[in-house]
Image (tube, rainbow, N blue to C red):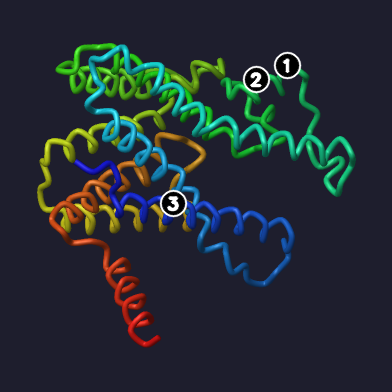
C-alpha cells in the first residue's frame, strides 16, 4: 500500500493557506486598525487550519506506522524521523530570530522579556507559559505535536490489537476531564489534557479506518464536514462562541476536519481525486501538447 496520498498533500496545502490568511488578518488589524474595511477580517477563522493540521498529523502518523504497532524495535527509527521532522528547521528559525533581536535588526523591543530557562524550554518545545514562546510564537502548536509523537510511542510498544482500545480510552479520559475538571494552572497538565489532543485521536481513528479500507460515503463525509466547518467560520465571524477555548475549536473545526480528511481519503481510494487535481493535470497536459 502506498504511503503517499495526494489528497492528504492537498489538505496540507489548504491548512497552510488557512493559517497564512489568519496571520494576514492579524497583521492587517495591527497595521491598519482604523481602516474602514479590513479585507482579511472575514478570514479570521483561518486559525482552524491548525486544527486541520492536528487531525492530518494523527492520520499520517497512524497510516505510516500502522505496521509498526506492537513492535518496540521500531521506536528508534520512529523517534529519529519525528526529531528530524520538527527540530532542525525550528532551531534554525529560532536562532535566526534570536540573532536579529540581539543585533537589533529591525525588531528590537518588539519581544517581551523571557527568562533564560524559558528560552531553553522553548528550544526543547517543552510545555510552558505561552508568553515564553515570544521568539517564535507559533511554536505553541509544535509543543502539541511533540507531545503527540511521544504519546504514540506507547502505542508502538503496546500490542497491536490494543491500539483502538487505547485510543478510545485516551479519548474518554480527555472528554471526561474537560467536562468535569476546571482549567489547570500547570502548563504541562494543560497541554497533556487539552481538548486539542482529541484532534490527533480523530486523525488516528481515520488512519485506522483508511488502512482497513472502511470507506463509507466519502462524498457525504466531505459535504457534511465542509458545511460544519463553514458553520464554525460563521460562528467565529459573528462572535457567537468563544474560540479562545480549545473545546470550542475542537467542535467547530477539529471534528469537521476529521470528516473532510476521511472523505478525501475515501475518494482517493475510489480513484476520484480532488477536482483541482484533475484540472491541474488537464492544464499541464494541454500546455505540453501546445508546445
Q: CA distance from mark 3 to mark 2?
A: 27 Å
Badge 2 density bin: few <14, some 14–19, many ≥20, Cα 10 Å: some
The residue lying toward the viewer, choosing from 172 and 234, is: 172
> Residue 59: which quarter of the image?
top left
Sequence order check: which comes first, mark 1 or mark 3? Answer: 3
The residue furthest bottom is 290
The residue indicated by pointer 2 is 121
The residue lying toward the viewer, choosing from 132 and 164, is: 164
* Residue 97 vertical placement versus 124 (above, below): below
Q: What residue is drawn where x is 72% and y is 61%?
A: 33
Query: CB atoms at circles 2 and 1 under 8 Å apart?
Result: yes
Residue 186 percent location from the top left of the image: 56, 15
Query: CB atoms at circles 3 and 2 under 8 Å apart?
Result: no
Determine whether the residue tagged by mark 2 lies in a helix, strand or loop: helix
The residue indicated by pointer 1 is 117
Badge 3 density bin: few <14, some 14–19, many ≥20, Cα 10 Å: many
The residue lying toward the viewer, choosing from 233 and 203, is: 203
Q: CA distance from mark 2 to mark 1?
A: 6 Å
The residue indicated by pointer 3 is 15
Amino acid at each position: 500500500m502506498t504511503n503517499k496520498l495526494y489528497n492528504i498533500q492537498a489538505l496540507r496545502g489548504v491548512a497552510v493557506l488557512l493559517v497564512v490568511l489568519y496571520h494576514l488578518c492579524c497583521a492587517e488589524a495591527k497595521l491598519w486598525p482604523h481602516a474602514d474595511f479590513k479585507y482579511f477580517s472575514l478570514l479570521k477563522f483561518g486559525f482552524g487550519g491548525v486544527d486541520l493540521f492536528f487531525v492530518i498529523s494523527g492520520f499520517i502518523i497512524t497510516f505510516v506506522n500502522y505496521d509498526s504497532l506492537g513492535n518496540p524495535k521500531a521506536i528508534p527509527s520512529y523517534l529519529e524521523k519525528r526529531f528530524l521532522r520538527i527540530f532542525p528547521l525550528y532551531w534554525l528559525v529560532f536562532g535566526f530570530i534570536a540573532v536579529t533581536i540581539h543585533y537589533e535588526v529591525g525588531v528590537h523591543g518588539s519581544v517581551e522579556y523571557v527568562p533564560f530557562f524559558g528560552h531553553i524550554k522553548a528550544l526543547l518545545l517543552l510545555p510552558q507559559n505561552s508568553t515564553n514562546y515570544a521568539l517564535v510564537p507559533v511554536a505553541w502548536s509544535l509543543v502539541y505535536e511533540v507531545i503527540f509523537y511521544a504519546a504514540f510511542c506507547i502505542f508502538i510498544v503496546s500490542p497491536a490489537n490494543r491500539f483502538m482500545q487505547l485510543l478510545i480510552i485516551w479519548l474518554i479520559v480527555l472528554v471526561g476531564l474537560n467536562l468535569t475538571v476546571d482549567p489547570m494552572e500547570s502548563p504541562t497538565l494543560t497541554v497533556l489534557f487539552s481538548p486539542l489532543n482529541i484532534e490527533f485521536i480523530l486523525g488516528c481513528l481515520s488512519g485506522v479506518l483508511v488502512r482497513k479500507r472502511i470507506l463509507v460515503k466519502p462524498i457525504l463525509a466531505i459535504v457534511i464536514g465542509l458545511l460544519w466547518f463553514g458553520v464554525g467560520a460563521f460562528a467565529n465571524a459573528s462572535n457567537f462562541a468563544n474560540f479562545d477555548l480549545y473545546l470550542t475549536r475542537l467542535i467547530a473545526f477539529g471534528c469537521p476536519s476529521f470528516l473532510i480528511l476521511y472523505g478525501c481519503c475515501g475518494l482517493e481510494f475510489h480513484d476520484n481525486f480532488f477536482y483541482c487535481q484533475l484540472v491541474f493535470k488537464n492544464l499541464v497536459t494541454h500546455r505540453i501538447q501546445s508546445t
